[in-house]
Image: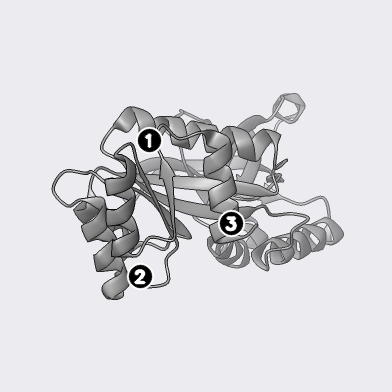
Amino acid sequence: MSDDRLRETPLTLRLEYRDAANLLDQWRRNLSQGQTFVRTREALEAGTRLRLKVGFPGLREPFVLLGSVRTARVEGGEPGVDVAIHFADRAEQDRISTRIERAAAGDPELCARVVRLLVLEDNPHIGALITSGLQEVARRELRGRVTFEVECAPHGAAGLAALARDRFDMAVCDVYLPVMDGPQFIREVRAGKAPGLPILAVSAGGPAAREQAEAAGCDLFLEKPLRLTELVAAIRRLVRF
């Protein structure tokens, strides 16, 4: 590599892995061996210096690795570059390895607790407000100790499909929904789809909506419009963080 190239400020790229186990697997198979493939549409020349910020949802601070571009190529139909990872010495490599192992084990000094919420709401504006509000609470009040991942579904049938393909810590379910309403969704969940899933039912329908939700098997009920403080208190009560 030329002296001019060495003096350049490294280009920063983010590598976001699916979860801690995925990062640990990639570290053991590729990164610790001094190589990886990074998907990017940027035209990067061989020798370009890189700063890789490596993380996953819930990691408080990304791991920073230094490297350089080897070659550009296409993998799995997506463009990217082969990257050489540069470690100052074996001691640095061992320190990073130890921290990644700790993160994969859920060390609270390195990782926030990730609370995954399934929100059944047919108004996308309300779903977006819940998502942004919880993210703000995680950042300001919980200081990064807990983060929220929110998936929104417009009706009960879509909610059941989400439960079939993924794991959630809790569901927030409106009572009145198209296609499949909230009480039917709750009954399906309690019948075996995910019987132990904590469910918060919400509605502006008053006592009738509360009765339907409680009869179906919800754990808690809140009146709409939701107040963020009430929502967070309900989540803390049902998920316990």
Q: Amino acid at mark 3?
A: Arg
Element class at badge 2: loop
| 152 or 70, nearer to the observer | 152
**Which residue lies at the image location 46% right of the left edge and 36% below the top edge?**
131
Label 2 crowd (10 A; few <14 / some 14-19 / many >=20): some
Q: Nearer the viewer, residue 224 or 170?
A: 224
Q: Quadrant of the N terminus?
A: top right
Q: What whole-number distance in Å separates the C-alpha atoms at marks 2 and 3?
A: 19 Å
Residue at the image point whose x is 50% and y is 42% from the top = 71
Q: Could one spot residue 149 in this view of the protein?
A: yes
Judge by depth and name the residue closer to the eye, 5 or 111: 111
| Residue at the disc numbered 1 | 127
**Residue 169 drawn at (x, y percent):** 48, 60
**Quadrant location of the C terminus in the rendered image:** bottom right
Residue found at the very far right of the displayed protein: 91
Secondary structure at badge 1 equals helix
- The tag on residue 194 is 2
Mark 3 falls on what kind of element? Answer: helix
